[in-house]
Each structure stands twice: as structure tokens, then as C-alpha cells.
Image: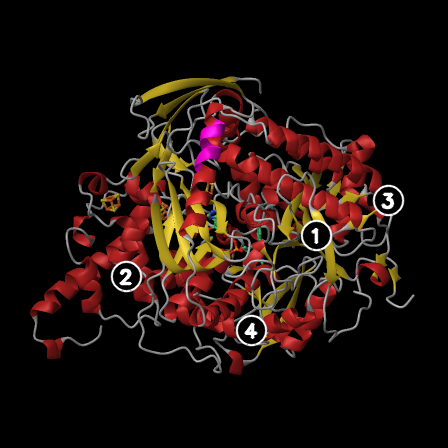
């Protein structure tokens, strides 16, 4: 049995995982990060927009402060967040951004004097103060009172991740790539590490650690249509759920983006609609004004996504080999505008679709984009239920996002949480001796070995794991998408339970040797269906609309009954998660009120 | 639409003693807006579940899917079948260790590379969380970003004659990375430090300047320009290293 030991084991080498590992290494502890892909390919690299921190250096950010950032974050969360955590986050963000600058991120900087910016497709000028020259600049990112988003041209995630990975190498963090954690090693009380499968050789290794961190990012790939990288399949969450004691928070809170391109669901920016792009149906009819006479295409992200879905449900979507979609039309903006102001969109259309947006329509549909839910932790990043288990980044429900995260807040979360949770882990390490029970380790390894042998031999059956995945996609896309209602969710839960039974009968067609991708799929499909059930079942039970969670049959935000966070655990052998609830927040720095957008009635706490 | 595409794909599973390198042929009906990402996943899900290949972002930003496509290194995710003949040949990138079929181990190569050139900001300063950030000229930040855009796909390494001949050659990507730190005022390394890292045949003097790297770079990074600048700088540094220290002023 191969065993590797360290003080900290981070399952995940994206921004969150590496930031935590760096904190541990800087404090003299050994740290290992695991990753399915080379660290720099982690999904964090795909974020182009930027990260929020109230630096207030730019003209449009003047007067900004952590307090304003805090108010935006709590409103954005639709009061679903933990306000103590949101406060920690907003106060920490400026420090984290400056630290990233210190480590080498080439943030865009303030250029003094009169500058031309764009809003709603129209240019305007603002005066940048000479005394701010060379400080970190910020751009606009919907939903915020001030311009607050730090950025590096169109490659923020890429630059920040490369810089962090450099820093990780410098301070001696070990990064092991092309490996996948398939289970946690624990005795029901303490987490001792993970069973890890090598994606080059198929070999299993036990990675043991005093502190284990889940930093595996989002789980968008339980949906067919997702902007997430193909590796965002919830591996870390599955491992946590499978312990039976760790809980997942607010899994029903899933954010959708209106304009993923079809077929590959790559994101095209909101800017298209901001600049005057319109949405058309199969008859090339502009339908948004019928639903939203005032704002049409410019209504908020969630509203536009909902209307698009509603319209396609009426049979007015464009049929394609990849399912129905709608058209985004930016042709009327003209060649000059498209090739310069919307260059990124132009490039995506040309490179991935072979569509020239100057003369052709762009196929789009609403697409899963961000997972607010994840491994539930306290404000220190410690997971509920298991000592020695932590989580940070998109995989965590640390909970500063509640039911809707603001653009630019998740990338910032990775490094801010990484900094805070990293420090807490260092404290934890200083006060802990390792408890490694060899029997527990041996059993965990043996269980995974047996599972693999069973899949190869087909002891439970020969269900095709890809077919099960497709069935899961059909079920969840239909029942737990943007619009939710009791009936569809019940059907969805029932379908997923059947699919769960099928997932327990998968077997391989191949031999499973080496880096076998069929085995990789077979090993995680049951867990993915469980995550889908956590989403669908949580959504069925939550009879209100809050943030991204929209119930057609319960359109009000119900603070009287639902100012709560859902906690899901999974008992061994069960075919549904066990749900429990806790208050969304223990402190109210900002009492529940109207968000100022999105509309909707509120049932007050004391009604 | 409606073409039948044939894919001739390199196959070899080093973990399977019975496996021998060969090519397998797969046929697929072309669909609208099909990319190699869609095609390869279809082949794996519907025809051969063992086919190994890598995709991650499938959006041209992570560099995972580089392979040799009809003889040329490139990114599979933004290769549209529409722009290809009906016969498509796919091979793994050379110069990297093969994991299986179209999948190679770029992670180990790149990690080795950045350990060698110490790919991080070298400074004696200590971060002060209470202080404002140090200022930087925006134009300079953008120039650093230009070079920072590399996605470590490995195409330039796979296309490089020198890299194929000598394993220890750092490649255009490493030299570009170093150029990024030379530009960066936060990095306090001296000319001599840089020279010690790359002033050799493994580094800048092993490059034959044949342009292949820049030709295949999917991010259009100006590799030649960087190589040229670095070569001149290092040649000069080579001369200066022979001179007494006191003449060795910053230049
Ligand atoms: C297209 C797109 C654009 C975005 N743009 C922005 C933006 O502009 N601003 C913003 O704030 N947010 C943005 N986001 C969201 C943001 O990018 C993510 O929330 C954030 O990067 C997540 O970082 P992370 O460190 O938590 O996880 P990731 O970066 O996803 O890293 C996860 C890591 O875990 C590893 N891993 C996963 N499973 C396993 C396993 N089982 N075993 C071992 N390793 C595993 C992976 O290999 C990877 O290293 C965007 C998201 C998308 C999809
Ligand atoms: S120019 Fe130099 S680095 Fe580029 S391909 Fe030729 S030999 Fe390789
Ligand atoms: S320099 Fe270009 S070709 Fe080379 S690894 Fe970077 S992005 Fe790829
Ligand atoms: S999959 Fe990321 S570049 Fe192709």
C-alpha cells in the first residue's frame, strides 16, 4: 500500500487550494495539493472578468469601502448569507488583492487624467486623480454600487492562478497532478486524508494528513449545459457526502447565465446585451419585450434566463442536434463595434462556432454557471461533522454568497478565504497531534480497491456509466433548472432516484487498465447523481423564491419560514439525502430588506 | 453538413502490456458546429470508452487539449471539423511523456521548467498588509500581461526542432516566461542571475531561431521577438561576465 504523509492535504490546486497550501507552507508545515489536471489548468484560470475588493482607487470606485462591499454582498445573497463571513470577506479582500500584486499579478493600474469608459454601450468620460496613478484599477461588474472589480485585461483568473502557482513552487508546496481523490479516509469523527487514484497509471495511494481541505471548485457538470470546465464534477463534494457525517449547504442554490453558446456552452459576456444585443426565437421574433416591457434583454441575469426558458418551453426554441436554443442577435451593432468593443465575443463565435456575428445569429441558451452550495463549514473553514476536514473556494459553503453570488465575488473569495482558512488551519496544526489509525486507512484503501475490481468484473451489473450520466442530465435539466415548481421537482427527484439505482449497477465495457477514462466515469457517477438529488430534493422542500432559487408556485421570498440554510447529509445506503436547517445568519448587521432589483414580494420575518 | 468524417487516432496504453502503438479508425457523422471536443467525446461515449484525451475548459484558455491535428500542433477544443478535410488524423504531442492515446504529461515538464528558471518574483521585501500597494505604470502592467498570456499548452515545445533533439532544452515558453520577469520591476534578479539560468545551450543559445514555435502558438505570443531580445541581452551579458565586476553596471 502506497502511503504519502503531510501536514496539509488540499484536494484541489485551483486558487483556493493553493492559497491555503501557501499559508501552511509559509508557516513551516508541509503541504500537498492534488489536482486532476496541472494546477494551472484548474477552472480558476477561465475567469476573465475579475475579482472584487473595495480599494476605491478609480474614479468610479470613489467612496467605496468594505462597508459598501458588504451591503452589496448581503443584498446580492438575497439575505441568505452568513453576515459574519461576508464581513470577514469584505474586510480581507483589499489585503488579499495587494498581496497578489506583491507576488506578481500584473493588475491593470490607474492612468491619471480624463478617461473614456463605456456604460450601456455609450461612452462617457471620468477623471482619474493624479494622486492615484499606478494604484490598482477597477472595472464595472453588475450588481455593485461602485466599480470594484480588480482585473488584468481579459485574463484575471489566468494571471492570478499562474502567480499563485509560482508562489506555491517557491515556498515548496508539492503539487501532484493527474490524480483524483475518490474517497476520504475517516473514522466518523476525524478526517485523516484521502484515497487517491492516479490518472496516469490507475494506481491507488493513501494521502494522509492532519488537515484535509476540499477545494475542488464547482460541480456544474451534473448539468448537461454548464459554463464550467469538464472537470468540475463535484469529486470533493462527493467524497465529503459519502462520509455520512459531513454536510453540504444550500445545494439547491445554483446560478445560471443567460448566454452560453450552443453546443459547447462557453460563456459570451453580458456586455452583448448591455450594448444592445437582442434575443430572438425560432421565428427570429424578439420576445423579451413581451415578457419584460421595461427592461427587455437588460433585466437581471436570473430574470432573462427565466424568460428564455419559459419561451423555449412554449416550443419556440430553435431545434438543433444539441437540444433547443435561442438566438442572440448583435448584427445591428455593426462590424466596427463588434470587432473592437466586443472582440472577445467575436473571437469566441469565430473560433468555436464558425459563426461571424457581424452577419450571423449566435446560438445561445441559459446555462448553469456557479454553485453557491458546497461543503458546509463554519467561519474558520472547518467542515461540519468531521474534525480535521476543511473546505474553501467554490466547493465550500463558507457562505458569503447565500442564494446568489455577485459577479467578481467568487474569484475574490478563493484567495480571501484561502488566506483566512489557511491561517485557521495553521492554528489547528499547531494544536494537534496526528491521529492516524492504520486500520482505518487499510479499510478505506481496501474498500476502493474492491469497488474498482467490482466495476471491472461487473459484479453489480453492466449499466453504461455514460448512459447513466445522460439520464441524470435529462432529469435535472428538466426538473431543477432555472424555473422550479413542486410538480416538476417531484418528477425530477423520482427520476433521479431511479437513476441512482442504475448508477449502482454500472460496470465497464473495457478492462479498466491504466488511465482508463471509463473507470474514471464509473467511479464518480453514483456520487454525481447523489449531488443532483441534493439539489433537486433541497429545491423541492424549499417552498419560496430566494436569489437564484425560483419557485413558480412560491414566488415570494419567505423570510418568515425560510431565512435558513439547507444542510444535506447522506446516510449509507439511503436513496435520498437527509435534510436539516439552520439559521442563515446569527448576526444581522444588515436586517432583511429589498434587494433593489429582481422584483418579487417578500414575506417578512414577523408576518 | 452530413459529411462522414474519418478519424485516424493514435492508440497506445503504456499500462497495458498487450498494447502496441497503432492507429484506430473511427467514423462519425458530422453535425452542425462540430468541434474536435464534441467529436472526441462522442467517439468515447458511443464507440470506444477507453479512448484517452484531455480537455478541461474546452474554451481555448487552459491549454489541456493540445495535440497534433493533421500534422500540426494545435488546440483541439477550438478546431472546427468544418474547417478540416473529412479525413482527420490525431496524434499526441511529441516531446512530452505519453500517458496514453492522445493524452500526454505536460504537468511534469512544465513544473520542471519553472523550477529550473525559478519562475517566481525574487524579492527581499516583505509584504506589509497594512500598506497600500506599490504603484506600477499601467503600460508596463499590460506589457507583462502580454507575456503572461501563455497557457502552457506545449504546442511550441512540440514544434521545436531543438526541444525534440535535446530533452534539457528549455524551449521558447521558458524563455518567454523569463522575459516576463526581466520586465517586472518587482523581480530583483540581476542580469547575471538571469544569465546563469539561461545563458547556455539548454537555454537561449540552443535556439535555432526557425520560428516554428511562434507559428503554432495558439495565443499568438510574440515568441520570436522575446527570443531575439533575450539572445542579444544574454550575448551582451556573456561579454560582461568576462569583464571585471566594477564595470558591471546595470544596463
Ligand atoms: C466561464 C467562467 C467565468 C468566470 N468568471 C468569473 C469572474 O470573472 N469573476 C469571479 O469572481 N468568478 C468567476 N467565475 C467563478 C470562479 O472562476 C470560480 O468560482 C473559482 O475560480 C473557483 O476556484 P476554486 O479554487 O474554488 O476551484 P477551481 O479553480 O475549480 O479548482 C478546483 C481544483 O480541484 C481539483 N479537483 C477537482 N476534483 C478533484 C478530485 N476529486 N481530486 C483531486 N483534485 C480535484 C481540480 O483539478 C482543480 O485543481 C467564473 C466561472 C466560469 C465558469
Ligand atoms: S525558434 Fe528556437 S525555440 Fe522556437 S522552435 Fe525554433 S529552435 Fe525552438
Ligand atoms: S508559448 Fe504559446 S504555444 Fe507555447 S506553451 Fe505558451 S501558449 Fe502554448
Ligand atoms: S480544453 Fe482548455 S484549451 Fe482546449
Discs 3 and 4 share one subunit = yes
**Residue B134: image location, x then y, percent:** 43, 77
Q: CA distance from mark 1 to mark 2?
A: 42 Å
Range covered by the magenta-colored residues:
A449-455
Give the number of marks: 4
Verify CB contact (< 8 Å) between mark 1 and mark 2: no
Label 4 or label 2, whichever lies nearer to me, is 4
Callout 1: SS: loop
Is there any visible trace of residue A36 in the rendered image? no
Label 3 or label 1, whichever lies nearer to me, is 1
Callout 4: SS: helix
Callout 2: SS: loop
Dot 2: chain letter: B
Residue linked to disc 2? B118
Residue linked to disc 4? A92
Looking at the rendering, which quadrant does residue B243 occupy? bottom left
| Disc 4 within 8 angstroms of ligand 1 (CB) | no
Amino acid at each position: 500500500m502506497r502511503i504519502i504523509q503531510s501536514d496539509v492535504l488540499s484536494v484541489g490546486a485551483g486558487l483556493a487550494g493553493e492559497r491555503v497550501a501557501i499559508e501552511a507552507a509559509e508557516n513551516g508545515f508541509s503541504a500537498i495539493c492534488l489536482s486532476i489536471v496541472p494546477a494551472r489548468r484548474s477552472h480558476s484560470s477561465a475567469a476573465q472578468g475579475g475579482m472584487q475588493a473595495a480599494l476605491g482607487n478609480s474614479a468610479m470606485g470613489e467612496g467605496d469601502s468594505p462597508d459598501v462591499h458588504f451591503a452589496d454582498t448581503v443584498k446580492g445573497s438575497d439575505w441568505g448569507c452568513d453576515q459574519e463571513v461576508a464581513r470577514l470577506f469584505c474586510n480581507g479582500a483589499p489585503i488579499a488583492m495587494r498581496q497578489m500584486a506583491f507576488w506578481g499579478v500584473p493588475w491593470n493600474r490607474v492612468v491619471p487624467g480624463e478617461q473614456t469608459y463605456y456604460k450601456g454601450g455609450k461612452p462617457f468620460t471620468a477623471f482619474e486623480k493624479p494622486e492615484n496613478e499606478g494604484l490598482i484599477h477597477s472595472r464595472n461588474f453588475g450588481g455593485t454600487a461602485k466599480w470594484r472589480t480588480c482585473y488584468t485585461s481579459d485574463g484575471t483568473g489566468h494571471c492570478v492562478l499562474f502567480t499563485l502557482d509560482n508562489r506555491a513552487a517557491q515556498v515548496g508546496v508539492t503539487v501532484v497532478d493527474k490524480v483524483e481523490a475518490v474517497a476520504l479516509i475517516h473514522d466518523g469523527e476525524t478526517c485523516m486524508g484521502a484515497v487517491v487514484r492516479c490518472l496516469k497509471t490507475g494506481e491507488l495511494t493513501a494521502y494522509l494528513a492532519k488537515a484535509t481541505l476540499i477545494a475542488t471548485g464547482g460541480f456544474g457538470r451534473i448539468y448537461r449545459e454548464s459554463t464550467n470546465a469538464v472537470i468540475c464534477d463535484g469529486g470533493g463534494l462527493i467524497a465529503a457526502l459519502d462520509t455520512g457525517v459531513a454536510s453540504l449547504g444550500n445545494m439547491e442554490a445554483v446560478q445560471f447565465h443567460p448566454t452560453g453558446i450552443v453546443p459547447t456552452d462557453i460563456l459570451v459576456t453580458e456586455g452583448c446585451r448591455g450594448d444592445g444585443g437582442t434575443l430572438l426565437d425560432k421565428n427570429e421574433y424578439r420576445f423579451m419585450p413581451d415578457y419584460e416591457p421595461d427592461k427587455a434583454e437588460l433585466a437581471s441575469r436570473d430574470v432573462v434566463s427565466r424568460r428564455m426558458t419559459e419561451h423555449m418551453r412554449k416550443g419556440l426554441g430553435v431545434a438543433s442536434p444539441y437540444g433547443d436554443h435561442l438566438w442572440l442577435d448583435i448584427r445591428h451593432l455593426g462590424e466596427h463595434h463588434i470587432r473592437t468593443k466586443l472582440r472577445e465575443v467575436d473571437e469566441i463565435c469565430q473560433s468555436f462556432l464558425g459563426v461571424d456575428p457581424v452577419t450571423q445569429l449566435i446560438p445561445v441558451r441559459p446555462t448553469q454557471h456557479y454553485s453557491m452550495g458546497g461543503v458546509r463549514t463554519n467561519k474558520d473553514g472547518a467542515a461540519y461533522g468531521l474534525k480535521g476536514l476543511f473546505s474553501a473556494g467554490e466547493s465550500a459553503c463558507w457562505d458569503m454568497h447565500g442564494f446568489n453570488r455577485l459577479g467578481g465575488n467568487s474569484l475574490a473569495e478563493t484567495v480571501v478565504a484561502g488566506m483566512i482558512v489557511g491561517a485557521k488551519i495553521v492554528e489547528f496544526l499547531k494544536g494537534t497531534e496526528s491521529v492516524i489509525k492504520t486500520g482505518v486507512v487499510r479499510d478505506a484503501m481496501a474498500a476502493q480497491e474492491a469497488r474498482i475490481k467490482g466495476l471491472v468484473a461487473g459484479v453489480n451489473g453492466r449499466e453504461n456509466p455514460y448512459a447513466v450520466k445522460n439520464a441524470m442530465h435529462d432529469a435535472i435539466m428538466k426538473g431543477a433548472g432555472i424555473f422550479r415548481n413542486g410538480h416538476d421537482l417531484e418528477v425530477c427527484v423520482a427520476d433521479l432516484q431511479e437513476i441512482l439505482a442504475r448508477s449502482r449497477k454500472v460496470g465497464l465495457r473495457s478492462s479498466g487498465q491504466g488511465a482508463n477514462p471509463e473507470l474514471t466515469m464509473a467511479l464518480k457517477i453514483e456520487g454525481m447523481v447523489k449531488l443532483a438529488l441534493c439539489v433537486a430534493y433541497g429545491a423541492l422542500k424549499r417552498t419560496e423564491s430566494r436569489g437564484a432559487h425560483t419557485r413558480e408556485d412560491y414566488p415570494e421570498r419567505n423570510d418568515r419560514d425560510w431565512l435558513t440554510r439547507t444542510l444535506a447529509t447522506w446516510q449509507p445506503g439511503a436513496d435520498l439525502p437527509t435534510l436539516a436547517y439552520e439559521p442563515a445568519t446569527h448576526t444581522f448587521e444588515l436586517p432583511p430588506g429589498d434587494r433593489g432589483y429582481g422584483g418579487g414580494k417578500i414575506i417578512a420575518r414577523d408576518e | 453538413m452530413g459529411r462522414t468524417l474519418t478519424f485516424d487516432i493514435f492508440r497506445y496504453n503504456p499500462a497495458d502490456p498487450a498494447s502496441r502503438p497503432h492507429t484506430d479508425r473511427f467514423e462519425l457523422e458530422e453535425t452542425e458546429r462540430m468541434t474536435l471536443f464534441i467529436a472526441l467525446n462522442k467517439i468515447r461515449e458511443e464507440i470506444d470508452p477507453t479512448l484517452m484525451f484531455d480537455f478541461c475548459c474546452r474554451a481555448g484558455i487552459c491549454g489541456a487539449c493540445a495535440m497534433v491535428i493533421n500534422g500540426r500542433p494545435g488546440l483541439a477544443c477550438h478546431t472546427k471539423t468544418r474547417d478540416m478535410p473529412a479525413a482527420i488524423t490525431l496524434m499526441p504531442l511529441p516531446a512530452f511523456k505519453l500517458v496514453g492515446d492522445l493524452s500526454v504529461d505536460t504537468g511534469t515538464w512544465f513544473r520542471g521548467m519553472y523550477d529550473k528558471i525559478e519562475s517566481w518574483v525574487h524579492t527581499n521585501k516583505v509584504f506589509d498588509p497594512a500598506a497600500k500597494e506599490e504603484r506600477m505604470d499601467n503600460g508596463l502592467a499590460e506589457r507583462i500581461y502580454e507575456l503572461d498570456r501563455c497557457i502552457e499548452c506545449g504546442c511550441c515545445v512540440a514544434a521545436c526542432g531543438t526541444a525534440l533533439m535535446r530533452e534539457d532544452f528549455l524551449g521558447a515558453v521558458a524563455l518567454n516566461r523569463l522575459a516576463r520577469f526581466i520586465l517586472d520591476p518587482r523581480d530583483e534578479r540581476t542580469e547575471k542571475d538571469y544569465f546563469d539560468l539561461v545563458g547556455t545551450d539548454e537555454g537561449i543559445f540552443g535556439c535555432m531561431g526557425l520560428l516554428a514555435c511562434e507559428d503554432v502558438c495558439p495565443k499568438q505570443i510574440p515568441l520570436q521577438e522575446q527570443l531575439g531580445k533575450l539572445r542579444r541581452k544574454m550575448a551582451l551579458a556573456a561579454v560582461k561576465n568576462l569583464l571585471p565586476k566594477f564595470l558591471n553596471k546595470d544596463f
